[in-house]
Image (cartoon, rainbow, N blue to C red):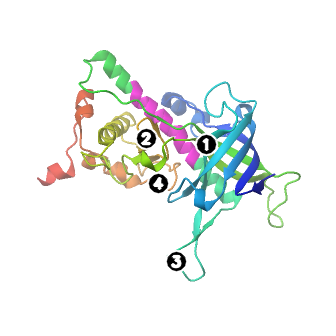
Amino acid sequence: MAYVVFEKQNETIHFYPIPKHPLTEILQNEDYRSFKVDATESWVGQLTVNVSRNNMIGMGGFKTAHQGWLTLTPPPVSGFSSVARQEIVVKRPFEQVYPHGVSTGPFKIGRFSVANELPKLFKEANVLYWVSSLLQLTYDFINRRLASSCPPPFAIPRVRFVEAGLALAFVQGPAVASKPASKTCPIRACYLLEELIVGGDNVFLKFIHNMDANPLLDELDYGYDLAVFFSFTQHVQYVKTSGLAFISDYQGVTELLTDPQILTDPGGQDIFGDGNIELAVTMFEAQHICNDYCEWAGLEKYETVEAQDS
């Protein structure tokens, strides 16, 4: 049951953390191909959400982000929410609701029905599930290169994506169908819970956009060197997946990332949501500009569109 006191909503939830599996295991085991809730790896807990629009952490094109606090029972031994009332980020998909006959200007935040909200958040969780594996694949490649060649003349950044999971709030008592003859759903609400990135907008950066395979930042901008590294990681992932996929929308702080996208080849099944710009994978070799990381790693240098036009 949920109740609101002074713009804070309290929920009893079941929390399902997003696990981590090596990419080889994901590809070899069909049960690991996508994120699934596992009752044996779940916790009951209390979730508090600051639902005030004025106090939102942020609003993107698909989701709102709210301040929240999570207590799991019993708490995990370590990691995400291993302490009581851990401050977290609570995310939910939304739609823009305009007054009748208007399609621009101020809008209200509309929430989806549970039947529509669940698939959207499962896709978001699935992206986080896969990006951890793709990033680990990249670091495995880097570590092998470090062990077999001279150290590079630059430091290798060490980053990770936020710890996260899905929280489901269930109907108290017998579930009631929303329409006659329709199936009942015991789930009342769904939330994506993420580790909090400390620092807010003052330190938060978008390093690479999902429409381009090169740094979004300019050379003199803070964080540019890290954006160059992320461009290199895309090259590694593109090669290691035989041109099928790579991580994009790299954003966050210098050690912790959130809200990524996975760009996939148009010939594959799209399981990664609205931010998957499939054309970007097709254009990768023409767009990507190799850098010092690519050269050190011995990656093939592609002929970009700019080079072809010169």
Q: Earlier in the sequence, mark 2 or mark 3?
A: 3
Q: Which residue is mark 3?
A: 103
Q: Quadrant of residue 136?
A: top left
Q: Earlier in the sequence, mark 4 or mark 1?
A: 1
Q: Which residue is mark 4?
A: 275
Nearest the viewer among 218 and 165 is 218
**Residue 130 lies in magenta, yes or no?**
yes
Crowding at mark 3 (Cα within 10 Å: few <14, some 14-19, many 20+) = few
Q: Which residue is mark 2?
A: 253
The magenta region covers: 124-140
Mark 4 vs mark 2, CA separation in Å? 20 Å
**Residue 26 lies in magenta, yes or no?**
no
- Label drawn at residue 88: 1
Q: Earlier in the sequence, mark 4 or mark 2?
A: 2
Q: Which residue occupies the extreme left position in the image? A: 310
- Residue drawn at x 25%, y 49% is 286
Label 2–label 1 contact, CB within 8 A: no
Q: Earlier in the sequence, mark 4 or mark 3?
A: 3
Tell me the element at label 4.
loop
